[in-house]
Image (tube, rainbow, N blue to C red):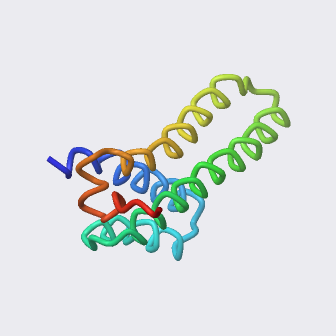
């Protein structure tokens, strides 16, 4: 069942892999393909690292969005749909990190330890 809970994280990195592939950034393609395999390690640092990487992925989508908007404006094409779609992709990528706040994944990645 944890696989289903982790699916948003895996899919987010899959979409980032496709994005980097389209941009011919093959080192980032390899890295973004391998990152989901970290989920097999049941350590707190894995969950926290993936949350940070997902936020960086969301920032990459926003950065790309502005670049693509400039291209669309330069050639006189409509850019509204592009902005909406990439904003949603960025939001979903960022929100994928929230899966680690669930009870079962907190337990799996040892995130439920309270510090008093």
Q: Is residue 83 left or right of residue 22?
A: right
The residue sitting at 62% across, 26% down in the picture is 84
Residue 91 to residue 38: above or below = above
The residue sitting at 55% across, 61% down in the picture is 52
Q: Is residue 59 left or right of residue 111?
A: right
Q: Is residue 77 left or right of residue 108?
A: right
Q: Position of residue 74 (x, y in %)?
A: 85, 37
The residue sitting at 49% across, 38% down in the picture is 92
Q: Residue furthest right?
A: 74
Q: Residue furthest front?
A: 116
Q: Residue furthest left?
A: 1
Give the number of callouts.
0
Quarter residue 112 falls in: bottom left
Which of 21/112 is in front?
112
Q: Is residue 29 left or right of residue 62?
A: left
Which of 6/66 is in front?
6
Which of 38/29 is in front?
38
Q: Position of residue 65 (x, y in %)?
A: 69, 42
Q: Position of residue 26 (x, y in %)?
A: 52, 72
Q: Residue furthest bottom?
A: 27
The residue sitting at 20% across, 51% down in the picture is 3
Q: Position of residue 71 (x, y in %)?
A: 78, 41
Which of 114/76 is in front?
114
């Amino acid at each position: 069942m944890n696989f289903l809970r982790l699916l948003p994280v895996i899919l987010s990195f899959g979409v980032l892999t496709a994005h980097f592939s389209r941009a011919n950034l093959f080192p980032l393609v390899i890295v973004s393909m391998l990152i989901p395999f970290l989920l097999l390690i049941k350590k707190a640092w894995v969950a926290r690292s993936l949350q940070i990487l997902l936020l960086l992925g969301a920032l990459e989508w926003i950065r790309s969005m502005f670049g693509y908007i400039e291209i669309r404006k330069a050639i006189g094409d409509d850019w509204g749909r592009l902005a909406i779609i990439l904003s949603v992709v960025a939001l979903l990528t960022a929100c994928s990190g929230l899966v680690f706040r669930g009870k079962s994944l907190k337990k799996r990645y040892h995130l439920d330890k309270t510090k008093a």
